[in-house]
Amino acid sequence: MAYIIDLKTHTDARGNLTVIENVLPFIIQRVFYIYGVDESERGGHRHQKTIQAAICIQGECKIYNNDGHQEEVFHLNKPSKCVLLEPKDWHKMYDFSGNAILMVLASEKFDNDDYIFTKYD
């Protein structure tokens, strides 16, 4: 099941610095980000093998997740919050604020055959 990772953040008078180091259970093979989203939903799939770490680095959005046994909604509203999505996690991203930027770190390079679009019953 998907879960939240609180990323280590250093804060002082100059601002914040958030670090992603030794917290992901995979080596990053791909990075992409989603922005400028209207009322549309993104995602709507799960994977054969890809693990993903999703961070809303600006603004906010929600991620609905279903691993076939449990459903959960994650509200990403801080760049120090990361949702880790396992391959079995059917997910969709929605309710993007106008300024939202959702960055996703992936364990695999893009492979169309890795995607499973069928929802769980």
Image (cartoon, rainbow, N blue to C red):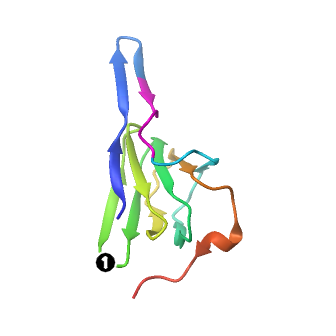
Question: For residue 3, which quarter of the picture?
Answer: bottom left
19 falls in the magenta region: yes
Residue 61 seen anywhere in this rendered image of the structure: no
Mark 1: secondary structure: loop
**Would you say 12 lies left or right of 92 here?**
left
Splitting the image into 4 quarters, where does residue 15 fall? Answer: top left
Q: Which residue is mark 1?
A: 69
Residue displayed at 56% across by 71% down: 48
| Circle 1 Cα neighbour tier, 10 Å, few/some/many (<14 / 14–19 / ≥20) | few
Q: Can you see residue 14? A: yes
Q: Amino acid at mark 1?
A: His
The magenta segment: 17-24
Residue in view at x 51 percent, y 58 percent: 51
Magenta stretch: includes residue 23: yes
Q: Position of residue 62 (x, y in %)?
A: 39, 58
Image check: 13 left or right of 50?
left
Total label count? 1
- What residue occupies the far top of the structure in this picture? 13
The residue at the point 68 percent across, 55 percent down is 109
Which of the image's four quarters has the N terminus? bottom left
